[in-house]
């Protein structure tokens, strides 16, 4: 029972273009959402987050959008750079001291 | 070091053997987490410590898995009678406190992981 779903295992984008990574969730109790980025042989690193009271959060080239009615969030990277090539994990949590629930990840390849 | 340190980075063992995986969190971080990442999957929560005590061990798959953090810093994940299905990357993460990060906001600092292969 996957509560956090990333239905695209991979995505390929040209350098300079926009990358859009999608994530769907089923648990309506989730109130905080995060994106982590993972390079090979490294642990995941936190990228950006959004609270359920917002619908958008922006940090430089990275923007996360949340659509609560659709239980959908997306990560936009613009412009995409070759160094953005990595696996991106969507994660979510219920309010309070509860563990993060991760999706399976999407491998992004940015082609120069 | 500055980050979360995990040893060994790679461990190959035979089915039925006992394994210990060690995690040294970022200095001053009181919250420590263990996750497991199987091939093609995202990280899966195992257990969380706040200080020395296990605050949530609901993710441990069965009683072959056990974790300790006796002095509130280094943690050891112990797996008894290993099975081939235990093969995965075991990730450790820490955060300053559960209130300021980690369990509250989800911002964790991960180590590079220990890759366990059970033959």
Image (cartoon, coloured by chain):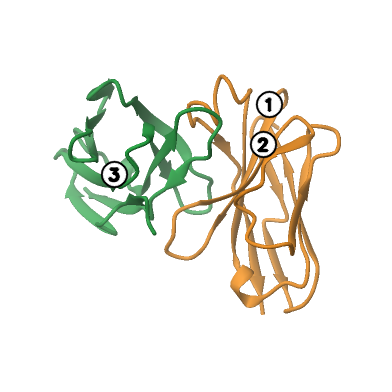
Chain colours: A green, B orange
Q: Secondary structure at mark 3?
A: helix
Q: Position of residue A94 (x, y in %)?
A: 44, 34
Please tell me if label 2 and label 1 are on a single chain: yes
Kindly identify which chain the residue marked by label 2 belongs to.
B
Q: CA distance from mark 2 to mark 1?
A: 7 Å
Identify the residue at horizontal 61%, vertical 69% (top origin): B87
Q: Nearer the viewer, residue A7 or B60?
A: B60
Quadrant location, the N terminus of chain A: bottom left
Q: Position of residue A12 (x, y in %)?
A: 21, 54
Chain name for mark 1: B
Mark 2 or 3: in front is: 2
Mark pair 2, 3: CA separation: 33 Å
Q: Which residue is mark 1?
A: B29
Closer to the camera in the image, A58 or B47: B47
**Callouts 2 and 1 close, C-beta under 8 Å:** yes
Which residue is rendered at x = 24% and y = 45% of the image? A21
| Nearer-the-camera pick, A99 or A27 | A27
Q: Is residue B59 left or right of residue A86?
A: right
The residue to which callout 3 is attached is: A82
Residue tagged 2: B32
- Asked whether, in this view, residue A80 is left or right of residue A27, the answer is left
């Amino acid at each position: 029972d996957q509560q956090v779903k990333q239905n695209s295992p991979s995505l390929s984008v040209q350098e300079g273009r926009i990358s859009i990574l999608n994530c769907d969730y089923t648990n309506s109790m989730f109130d905080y959402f995060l994106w982590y980025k993972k390079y090979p042989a490294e642990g995941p690193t936190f990228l950006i987050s959004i609270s359920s009271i917002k619908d958008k959060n922006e940090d430089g080239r990275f923007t996360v959008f949340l659509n609560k009615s659709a239980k959908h969030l997306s990560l936009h990277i613009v412009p995409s750079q070759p160094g953005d090539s990595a696996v991106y994990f969507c994660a979510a949590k219920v309010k309070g001291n509860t563990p993060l629930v991760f999706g399976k990840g999407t491998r992004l390849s940015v082609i120069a | 070091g500055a980050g979360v340190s995990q040893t060994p980075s790679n461990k190959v063992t035979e089915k039925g053997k006992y394994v210990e995986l060690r995690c040294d969190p970022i200095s001053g971080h009181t919250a420590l987490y263990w996750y497991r990442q199987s091939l093609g999957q995202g990280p899966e929560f195992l257990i969380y410590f706040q200080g020395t005590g296990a605050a949530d061990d609901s993710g441990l798959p069965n009683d072959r898995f056990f974790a300790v953090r006796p002095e509130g810093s280094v943690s050891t994940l112990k797996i008894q009678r290993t099975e081939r299905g235990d093969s995965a990357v075991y990730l450790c993460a820490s955060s300053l406190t559960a209130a300021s990060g980690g369990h509250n906001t989800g911002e964790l600092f991960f180590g590079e992981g220990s890759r366990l292969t059970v033959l």
